[in-house]
Image (cartoon, coloured by chain):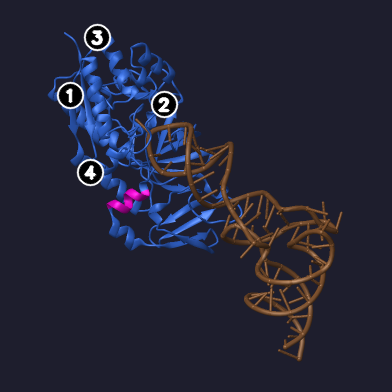
Chain colours: A blue, B brown
Amino acid sequence: MKKRVLLAMSGGIDSSVAGMLLSEQGYEIHGVTYRTYDSVKDSCISKETGCCTVDSMMEAKRLSEKLGYKHEILDLRDSFKETIIKNFVDEYLKGRTPNPCVVCNSDIKWGELIERANELNCDYIATGHYARIINEDGRFYLAKGIDENKDQTYFLYGLSQDDLKRTLFPLGGLKKDKIRKMAAERGFVKLSEKKESQEICFIPDNDYRRFLTDEVPEQIQEIGDGDFVLTNGEKVGTHKGYPFYTIGQRKGLGVALGYPAYVVDIDAGTNTVTLGTKDDLNGAGFVVGNVNLMKYDQIPAEGLEVNIKIRYRNQGTMGRIYPDGKNLKVDLYHNASAITPGQSAVFYENDDVVGGGLILSVRH
RNA sequence: GACUCAGUAGCUCAGUUGGUAGAGCACAUCCCUUUUAAGGAUGGGGUCCUGGGUUCGAGACCCAGCUGAGUCA
């Protein structure tokens, strides 16, 4: 009997090709597309949009019909709003910089997918992510996708053993240009030429500042303007409220100091944003919370040498991680620039994901 | 009140012995990118404080005024 797979489809090229591959490998496919958020702006945006918009839902449905899959739309709007959007807004109001995609994957998507898979008697769930799953002595962990450039393990480090056990990533061993070629060969020329999606799915205009203003206008109003200061405390300008800034930001400050100025600190308590030079952004270490371990079930007390990515599409820096209660303490061998509370740090041994967590505090 | 210095792009300033202006930062657009950033490329911008004068020609020289900073009474 054919194995059944619940495939998360975005309507984009990656998840579509993933489906074609699985189908060719003999799986029976049931397509599903999430509905996470209805943005008023969806209908008037013609460019390629995010992973969960109305346009892409229709696209996914159309593709499923063409490929002969069953397809359904999974309405996650409520839980998405209650967890992801709430967390997103709260984090900014705390002066931190959230990464909703990370939280969404581990807290929403996989949970809902597996639940639905159970209901539909699917053996696996699958997505078009560029990542590989390795099973070693009964323990599952992620490894970077073969296409180093497209690797998406950074967004997936929060997946649990149970999640990984049930997941297939058909694209993990392939490169993007190959994926495009495969789509074209199978007659999906238009699909093969699609642009990458990029923005947060609930912010199609890619302007999180506008989103915050729309979402919690009274709080933004109450926070109001604040001071831009230098590291020595000198006031050099006025900003529009600390939630509109993030560590490492340079553009949009509107402050001319004669040298490039970056946001080096955000103080939600006093509504103060500190500016400094690129050097001022250097950090020597940090602590992460909300830790999820993958390759090992614990980190030895004497520490573990890993490659550390403090943001997506960053080659990472070498360092050591140590257990610190429920958290992990991270010592970098070389300074990293703009370590940002709220962002995720992911730890690697070569291509293998050791684990990751949310950056809580930074040590300069 | 007298004297000195300053007044050039949004900001800080450079403009050689007079030939219709530049740099850094800022800003905009694009590229990159399933977070936020960073980074790369391109680009928009100036009554050269005002009014006279000298000159073929003045941001630059002369005179007057306005504004700002400072020094001396």
Residue bearing the label numbered 3: A26
> A110 and A323: which one is in front?
A110
- Disc 2 marks which amino acid? Asp
First in sequence: mark 2 or mark 3? 3
Which amino acid lies under the numbered mark 3 shown in the image of this protein? Gly
Q: Which residue is mark 1?
A: A117
Q: Position of residue A192 (x, y in %)?
A: 38, 20
What residue did someone put label 4 on? A81
Q: Amino acid at mark 4?
A: Lys
Q: How far apart, in angstroms, are the residues tagged by discs 3 and 4?
A: 37 Å
Q: Is residue A321 visible?
A: yes
Give the amino acid at mark 1.
Ala
Label the magenta part by its dominant secondary structure: helix
Relative image position of residue B58 (x, y in whole percent): 75, 61
Q: Residue furthest left?
A: A119
Does mark 1 fall on the same chain as mark 4?
Answer: yes
1 or 3: tag closer to the N-terminus: 3
Q: Considering the numbered disc 1 on the image, is that residue within a helix, a strand or a loop?
A: helix
The chain ID associated with circle 2 is A
Which numbered mark, 1 or 3, is in the foreground of this view? 3
In this rendering, is residue B67 above or below A207? below
Q: Across the whole image, how many numbered discs are drawn on residues?
A: 4
Label 4: state its secondary structure.
Answer: helix
- Can marks 2 and 4 be said to lie on one chain? yes
Q: Earlier in the sequence, mark 2 or mark 4?
A: 4
Give A334 or B45, whichever is nearer the viewer: B45
- Depth check, mark 4 against mark 1: the one in front is 4
Residue range (magenta): A209-215
